[in-house]
Structures are given as C-alpha cells and as structure tokens.
Image (cartoon, rainbow, N blue to C red):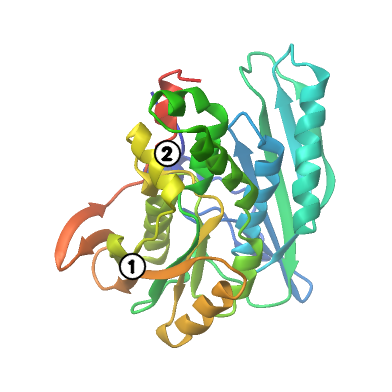
Amino acid sequence: MNVGKPRREILESMVFKYVGVNDPDVVQGPAFGEDAGIVRLGNGYLVTHTNPITTASRRIGWLAVNVAANDVAVRGARPRWAELVVLTPPNSHEGLVDGIMSDADKAAKAIGISIIGGHTEYTPGLPRPIVISTVIGYTDKRIVTTKGARLEDLVIVAGCIGGEGASVIAWDFPHLLAERGLGSDVISEARKFIERVSVVEAALRIAPYASSMHDLTEGGLLEGLYEVSIASGIRLAIDPSLIQLNPVVAAVTRALNIDPLKLLSSGSLIATIPEPYVDRAVNSLLEIGIPCSVIGKAVGGEPGVVLSSGGRVLSEIRESIIDEIYKLYSKNMC
C-alpha cells in the first residue's frame, strides 16, 4: 500500500513538470524539498503554501494553520492570510465543523493570521475529517529556500524533534500507549506538544543568517535533511549523538518501537548556516527558549545524508522516508 508522499522520481516526472504557463514573476515553483511557492510582487515577494492534515483526527484545525504557516515562515516571510478547505464525513455532527474552525481561529490569532476564505463540505466516502490549508505571506527582505545550502555550512536543528508525532499518537492512540505501559502523566505531557508546533518566530529570527531552511513535517528530521541535501545538491554529514531528544518523545516512540527521527515533527526546523553566523543564530533561538543544536555539516560528495559518530558510519539516507506514524494507521489501531 502506498502512503505518504510519492517517491521523488514520481514527483519529478509526473507532478513538477506540469506548471501551466511560464510566468517570469515566479521565483520558486514546484520542486523537491521546497516548502512554498514564491512570486515576485512589487518590491518584495509573495510566499504561499498549501498543506493537508491527513494523519491526525484531533486538533486538525490548529495543525492545519500552524503547519502551513511554518512553510511560509521558513522562506523568511511572515504568514498573514489563510484559506481553509474543511472536508467532513457525510454523517458528521455539526459541532465537528465548529470545533475544527474554532481551533483554526485560535491558531490564526496566535500567529497573527487572517482567515480570508475557503470551502466546507460533507464529503462522500470520507472516513474522518480532513483540513487543507493555504497560508500566504509577504516579505520585502531576502528570501530563503531549501536549495541554498553550501559546502562547509553547519547544520542546526531547532525545536522538539518528533513532538508533533508524539502528540498525535497521544491524542489518537492513548489506549495503545497505556497497553504498552505508559502512565497517564506521560500521555498527558505528550499531548501538550501539539500546542508547540509553530516555528514561525524561530524561522524569522534565524532567516537573516540561513543559507537554507526547512521545517520538519512528514518523515521527520531525516526526511527534512534528505530534502535539503537533494534540493541543494550537497551531502550532509550528521552526528546522531548531537541530536537532542525530548524524554517524553523518547518514551512514546520507544513504547511503540518507532523511530523518532522519522516521525512528524512540526514545531522543529533545520537550517544550514555559514560557520561565522552560527553562534548568532543559535543564541537568537536560545534567547526565546527554543532548544537548538549543531548536528552536522555540509560536505563534499554525492547528495544524500550520512549518519556517523566517532568516525563510524551508521547509516545513509538515499531515498525519501515514509513517516513512522503510518504504521499505526495502516494497522487500523485507531
């Protein structure tokens, strides 16, 4: 069964080549690893991203706004406007839509976004609600792309790796975690990660220093690293021992035997920073309480991600990652 993003080869041969007319004002169109479209507008840039929430059934209005806003912010633009498509099963109670939209409203207000339109319907054949969000931002400053990493740049990661996935699991599969021996206190703490999925302020703080940025969503940290590597045409050498993992995320993923580095990670981002600016970037995040660490470097060689520690190669990433959370849904555990 195919789940998650299609393989890069499929995207490049069957999706990205169909772009309509050639518009000279399009600065960044569809491409592997790029988080948002960028269009030249006036003296600046319009930045836009569309994203569906398909791997969660709780707090999906909140996630929809935040996840799409993150993709705009890592381009160096502040998110300002949103449109939402809310699809619900045919026999859904009316309170479901109200709950989704009130949650989206809460997220939008927290970020400073105006919801300006969208579409709502009861959709035949849909087993659970799906929300698709489009968020738009604007900047007259320098833009940042995924493809901008350069040789010798250092790689930093900020935020809670796997926090989004741990939270979705705690909301949708609490019985499973309890069966695996996790207490209600751990499950409760894991659920709180969903309130910290925004990277908007973090991205805007380090944008002046970054050669590339990428927020971590489906496929987690390892997929994000792989996408930066392929988009930039550069090899990333990563030391897993430098990756900080939250103890609650570790407990949740260990209980289910899933890899936290391949798990939904909205609320965290990676950036490549030229070495002279790394301390400034890291300190700017620590000042606002966002955990941040240097985990590797852009090196010469074939594009891909090599994980090594103590001079020993542990593994290499040469293709896209299927997010670990699909293991739970594919086994019909919900």
Q: Which residue is identified by label 2?
A: 252
| Residue 37 position in % (x across, y down) | 63, 57
Q: Position of residue 117 (x, y in %)?
A: 84, 42
Helix, strand or loop at label 2? It is: helix
Q: Identify which amino acid the numbered label 1 is placed on.
A: Ile
Q: Please state if 87 lies on the left or on the right of 147 as rendered.
A: right
Q: Of label 1 and label 2, which has the lower sequence position?
A: 1
215, above or below 18, in the image: below
Secondary element at image label 1: loop
Q: Look at the image and tell me whether residue 5 can be seen.
A: yes
x 57%, y 47%: residue:
193
Disc 1/disc 2 C-alpha distance (Å): 33 Å
Identify the residue at horizontal 62%, vertical 71% (top origin): 288
Q: Position of residue 85 (x, y in %)?
A: 74, 35
Q: Is residue 329 above or below residue 38?
A: above
Q: Please name the residue shown 32% across and 35% down the image.
A: 257
Q: Nearer the viewer, residue 178 or 215?
A: 178
Of circles 1 and 2, the one toward us is: 2
The answer to which quarter of the image holds residue 112 is bottom right
